[in-house]
Structures are given as C-alpha cells and as structure tokens.
Amino acid sequence: MNRMPLLLTGIFLTFFSAWLGLVAMPYIHLGRFKPQVDDVTREETPPPFSGEALQGATIYAANGCIYCHSQQVRPLEAGADLERGWGARRTVARDYMRDKVAYFGTSRTGPDLSNIGARQPSAEWHYQHLYQPQVVSKGSIMPAFKFLFEKRRISGQPSADAIKMQPPDEAEPGWEIVPTREGKQLVAYLLSLKRSTYPLPEAPEETPAK
Amino acid sequence: MAALAEAQPAKPSLADSIDPSTTESLKYKAERAAIDRSLRGPVLCFIGGAIFWLLLGSLFALIASIKMNVPGFLGDSAFLTFGRVRPAHLNAVGYGWGAQIAMAVGLWLMARLCRIEVRHGGLLYMAFGLFNAGVMIGILAILGGQGTSVEWLEFPTYAALVVFAGFALVAIWAVIMFRFRQPGHVYVSQWYILAAFFWFPWLYATANMVIFILPVQAAVQGPVNWWYGHNALGLFFTPIALATAYYMIPKVIGRPVHSYYLSILGFWSLAFFYSWNGMHHLIGGPFPAWLISASVVASIMMVVPVITTGINHHFTMVGHFNALRWSPTLRFTVFGAMCYTLSSLQGSSMAIRSVNQVTHFTHYTIGHAHLGLYGFFTMIMFGAIYYIVPRLVEWEWPSASLIRWHFWLSAIGVSAMFIVLSIGGLFQGFALEDPKISFLTSTNYANAFLWMRSISGIALTAAHIIFASSFALILLHAGVVRRRPTLLDRPA
C-alpha cells in the first residue's frame, strides 16, 4: 500500500468512530445522572455516602477486593444473581452516581457485594470475617486482612470496639484486637453498600420464580 | 511483500547467483548492519528491561496463584495481600514486559522496513528510563496500597504520566522513522506498527483522563475502562504481534506473503472491528443494551480479520512446515500465530450473551487472557527476540538446548494453563448459574484446577529463567564462535 494519506486517515477514522461510540456516547447517555428526590420527604436516592464510607472505598481499592468481588446485580434473564438473593432488583447505571470510582468487577471468586450492607448489616460480622474469614465462612479462600487490625494490651477497661474473636484466633488474656482506622473505614463502606434496596423508577423490583 | 523484496536485489545478476558476496548484496548487508548498529543500545536496553519485568511478573503471578490454593500464604503483610500482588503481576507483565517488548520489536522492525538508521538514539535511552521508572513507581504504588483497582489502569496517575511520557517518545520516534523512510512500497508490518503507535497513546490518555484526571460519573467509567482494557490488547499488542509475524514468517522461510489483498482486508477489518470491542465485559451489568450490543457485534465480526490473517499466514507457510524443526524464531512465531486464531475465535464466542452469562465472572476469562497475551503475543515476541538479538550483538545464541527447553516449557505451560482454567472456569460458571448450588461449592469446583494452574505457572517461570539465562549468555558472548545461526535441528 503506498497511498499514505489513505492509510493515515483510515487509522484515524476507524479509531475515532469507536471513540465516539464507546467514550463520547456513553458520556452523553450515562454521564449526567441526578438523584431521585422524594416529593414529600426531600430524601435523595441513591443516598450519598458518608465521609467515612468514601474513605473506605479507597481501602477497598487499595487492597484489590475487586479481583474477587463484583458490585453489580444482573437482571433475571441474564444470570442467577437475583435467585441467589444478591439484590431485590438489578442494578442500573444511576445506582453508581455517588461513587467516585465504581468497582463493577469482573470476577466472582467471592460473592457479589452490591448489597452486602443489607445482607450482612452487622459491623461485628464484618470485622470477624475480615480477621478470620475461614472461621466465619468455612471453606472460603478469602485471605485474612489482619493488617487492618491491631493487637494491643488492655489497659483498664477493654475497648468498646474490640472484636469478639473465635478460636483458633482468640486473643490471649490481657490482650484485645481492635480494627485500625482503615479497618473501620472499610467496614463503613461495606455497610453502606445497599445499591438495590431503594426504588428507582427505571428499575422495578423483580421476583424470581421459585 | 515488495518492501522485503527490495531489501534484497530485485533480480540477481549472474555474478550474484554465483558468488553471494558480490557488491550488490554486500551493499544491502552493510545497510542492514548499519541500521542494527544504530539501534543496538536502545533496543537491547528495552529487551533487557522487558525480561527483567517478565521475571518479576512471573514471581508475582506465582505468589498470587499459590494464595488461591493456600489463602494464608504470605498473608500477614499488607503489601503482599492477594489484591495487591495480582495487579502487580498484571502490570509487570502487561506494561513492563508486554508494552516494553512491543516497543523494542516495533522500533527495530520499523527501522529495518523503512531502511533508515535511527537518529538521535540518545532520546530512546531517555524513553527507556522514563518508561521503566514509571512502571517501577506504579508497581511499588500498587504494593504500597495506592493502586486504583481499575483493571489494566491500576497505576496511580503520577506513575501513569511517567509511563505515558516514555511511551510517547518511542511512538514519536517510530513515526519520525516512517517519515524518513526510503522510497518504495510500504509493507503490511509497517501499517500495523504505525497504527499501534498511534492508537495506544490515544487510548491510554483517554482512559486516564476520563477516569482519574477529570473523572466522569462512575457509570461512564465502566465502558471507558473496558474499551481501554480490551483495546490495549486489540489495538496495541495484537497489531505489533501481527506485524512481527508478517515479517518473521516470510523472512525465515524465504518466500513472500501469500496474498497482498488478504493482508489489506485483514488490516482494515481489524482496525474497524477491534476498536469497537470491549463492552462484552459489561454484559449483564448496569449499562444500556445498545452499548453492549454494538460491541458484541464487533466482537463477532472479528472473525473476519482473524480468519483472513490465519489463511494468509497458513498459505505462506504451506510447504515449509519442515522449517519448524530447525528455526527457533519460526517455531515460536507459528505457535503464536496459531494461538491468535484460537484465542480470537474463542473471544468472539465469549461475547455471545448466552456463553458470556456462564463464563463472565469465572477463571475461564483468565484462561482466555493467557491464551491471547501469552500464547499469541508473548510467544511471537520470544520468536522475534531470537531473531533480532544475534543481529544486534553480533553473536549467535550459545545453546540450542536452552532454546528448546524454553520453547517446550512455555508451550506446554501455557497450553496446560489454558486448559485447566477453561475447564475449571466452566465448572465454576455452571455452578454459579444454578442457584440451587451454594456459592461456596462454585469456588470449590474451581479449586482443584487452580492447583494445576499453579503447577503450569511453575513451568512458565522456569521457561522464563532459562530464557533470561540465554539472553545473559549471548550478551556476554558466551560459548564458541559460530559462523551460522543456532538452529534446533539440522535443516532438511
């Protein structure tokens, strides 16, 4: 091929067409969501994250939770997500408008976390699970995140946020295990993940046939 | 094909036919030697850097893989947790090895095909320094807890900028070489390299800009993320590897490419369809149907360039398969070209919604990724290194058996990895799609296969260590003086 202008224009145009279709169009279509505001209570859905939960999202990213956990509930016709009880409805684009970065995920070596805050509402459960996953969930291959906790000597009263350990990881007498600041932020984020628990007009609830 | 033919005398004179060292062929030999000399330093640096990251990336891969078998393995320190080592592996092999070796081979091919010596090669050393510093900063940032967890874009912005600067310098240099090319036909490899060096900076810049620097709402990040993630493969690694195969196969067997028109069809259909790929990574996700469907169609249409290129390579090879017995370059290249056909057809099938529904969140995808990036891209790059390095260092490979070991460990390792991840992934996927089977059972199904994956990973790591030793030995001019290339067997 010796017609250089043709080659260069073609290289540009093929790419530009995809850029328009897969970057510019999604931006126009999905880039400017506003929350749904209730007429009476003025409550906004999806609700904003707390500051602590937003910090927690960076801990979620820093430790690569995304490499095993997704955050998306597929509709009934596209998978067994609803039947597994991972949400009351599919997630839609607007559910993610409060996220700085969305962790949709591509792997389910672990279960979906879109609604983990509703499915496991206890902070205590999350702390124990992060500290000793195999004890809370037998047979799990999730790694322990002990570095999100510190072991310290009890001076005076035990701390209110010390976690109740189960064997074989019980703290020795006189010692306690408390989550670090990062640990608390991560759990705050996990507890705030309730993506398809509130109604949105574009996403009606779906009931899987039993 | 004409460009290659021009590198040789078009019609040998009688003198040429009698004596190989007549003036005409000597002139071309001297020209090629001068081009190689002008690139020796920078290209060897890039190859060396790439091999360094290949070794480190293999180590990260092994650690991550064993963690899936034994969750507690090296689990107490934050910087070695699975969620950090895994992206460290991906970025070390994806950028440190993959992008870097693509730059090395792309630059060398471009210079050879444009038939010009590189000017101001010093700037390429700067590019080498920037690129590797960027990758190093990025990997340390990931291990240190500053990774972004956006797949393929885990480097924080400060590292990504340095990587980009290094890459952009190389791309500019390749374009400048092209502008100064000797007049004549522009060969198919040059189209691919030119396109790849134009597409990748645009892809990388767009993705980083839209997701991190001036972030858009999260729902747009998903499509942009996978448009980048898939096209880094489709519009960068793939064209560079195809350019290499289009160069190496005719060079080694000494005959032109089968069909010029198939080359054209293959190139333009790849440019048009591959660029629209990627959204099938979002099937079932919270995105509009038109977006995903457009990409699914493009994925299926990828059958056109893949079959076209496959046929073209096959008919070039026909009658010369014997050469696979003795030529290291050809053996790696043809293995890679076959994996290209296989992994691309598999990729098209994985974009079909009903197939994707089962395979989407499983290890099946990981198997596919290794077939593409290792079986296809990496194997072709190995082949190219075996061809290029002796010409740069003016020394032949010291040991044929090291090359043989490298080939078989790599070929068997990656095939085994692909097979066990595919089977394990299918078990996992069908279990995930059946709500009567508990979630934990789906992971348990995959676990046995993940053990086998670790073993195949050990084979690949061994192959890389052997390859790196071979590279070190040739740099040191080890072994005996050889007057002919090191072959795996006696040519028939």
Image: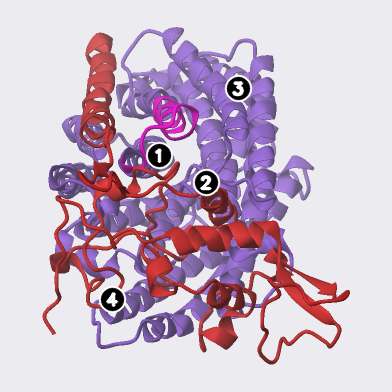
Majority secondary structure of magenta residues = helix
Q: Amino acid at mark 4?
A: Gly
Judge whether residue B207 is colored magenta: yes
The magenta stretch spans which residues? B202-219
Mark closest to the chain's N terminus, 1 or 2: 2
Q: Position of residue A167 (x, y in %)?
A: 68, 92
CA neighbours of label 3 inside 10 A, class few (<14), some (14 to 19), many (20+)? some
Q: Quadrant of the C terminus of chain A?
A: bottom left
* Residue labelled with disc 4: A85
Residue B33 shows which numbered tag? Answer: 3
Foreground pick, A143 / A127: A127
Q: Compute the Cα span from label 1 to label 3.
A: 33 Å
Going by the picture, which residue comes out furthest to the front?
Answer: A40
Residues marked 1 and 2 touching at CB (< 8 Å): yes
Foreground pick, A1 / A73: A73
Q: Compute the Cα span from label 2 to label 3.
A: 31 Å
Element type at mark 3: helix
Foreground pick, B447 / A161: A161
User: Label 1 is found on which chain of the structure?
Assistant: B
Element type at mark 1: helix
**Which chain is assigned purple?**
B
Residue B232 shows which numbered tag? Answer: 1
Residue at the spot 63% in from the left edge and 80% down from the top edge: A132
Do the residues marked 2 and 3 share a common chain?
yes
Do the residues marked 1 and 2 share a common chain?
yes
